[in-house]
Amino acid sequence: MGKKIYDLLLRAPDTALSDAEKRQMEETFRFKPFFSARLMARMEKAYREEREWLPGLTFAFNRVALPVLAFTLLLMAVIIFREQTFTLDALTGVAGVSVEDIVGSVFVSL
Amino acid sequence: MLTLATAPDTELIARSRTGDHTAFRMLVERYESQVAGTVIGMLGNGEEAEDVGQEVFIRFYRSIENFRGDSSLGTYLTRIAINLSLNALKKRKRKQLFGFFTGENNGPEFQVPDNGQTREHQETQELVQKALLGLEKDFRAVLVLRMIDGYSSKETAEILNLPMGTVLSRLSRAQKKLKEILENTYGYHFHEVG
């Protein structure tokens, strides 16, 4: 049988295989039985999980992300109102600070 | 009346788009053996091939809205199967390299699962797959598409996005190499092909 399938493999590009030979070739390269059932179960599971965690994510976004965004906007408004400007100095509360200083201090501390 | 089993692919695709799982499952059953030929030919039969095979259909399902039908569904799925198989081979190589440095054994390259087939059938599967895995992945891809999936050289060139000349030269070299493996390893002798 081994030699026969090899012979089929080598002949396949050059000659048309009979239906029986095609079937034999298919039998050599096939998944375990019930492939479609396993696939559908996997897709169903993924779909169910997605449906389970998506509302949770939306809930977390509404409860956390939106208040944080509102707080940030409020903070920015307060800074602009008090300092009449929106510079890096006003944001950090330290005069004469540059982006390079901040980045440099982070690397020094590391 | 048209039943799902006899419905054309276009009908099943249209139904799948509306969430008809039975129609999608029918498509899976229709193309399962073709996808199996590609991924098992490329990766050998084992958990990895099963996983990649499932991933092919999941990718198709996710992009079903974009499937315009420029090529046949079989060709479309084969293209996904080849790309995912090549990715899996790259991942396998990285894993083997990592295993080499960490001393971990990543197990055999493939295993033929017990599908309730005869011992002789399993042995044949194992030998064929070993012979195919003895080829470089680029040669193997051409051989799998031409020999197992039955695509023409022109279709193989389109699927692999290669010039026709490259496909023909790779095919000829792959056939030669395969014969060498079979003759040297298993002592089989063949008459000249082509």
Image (tube, grey):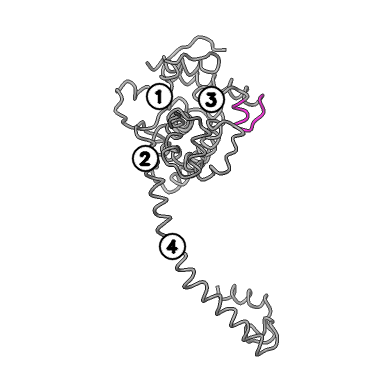
* Picture coordinates of residue B111, whole percent (x, y): 37, 33
* Picture coordinates of residue B89, whole percent (x, y): 50, 38
Spatial CA span between label 1 and label 2: 20 Å
Q: Residue at x 40, y 54 (%)?
A: A49
Q: Quadrant of residue B108?
A: top left
* Residue extending furthest toward the top: B191
**Type of the residue with mark 2:** Arg
**Residue topped by disc 3:** B143
- Position of A43 with respect to A99 (left or right) is left
Chain where mark 4 sits: A
* Picture coordinates of residue B162, whole percent (x, y): 64, 31
Residue A38 image label: 2
SS for tag 3?
helix
Chain where mark 3 sits: B
Graded by Cα atoms within 10 Å as few (under 14), some (14 to 19) or many (20 or more), the crowding at tag 3 reads many
Q: Earlier in the sequence, mark 4 or mark 2?
A: 2
* Residue extending furthest toward the front: B1
Give the label, 3 or 1, closer to the camera.
Answer: 1
Spatial CA span between label 4 and label 1: 45 Å
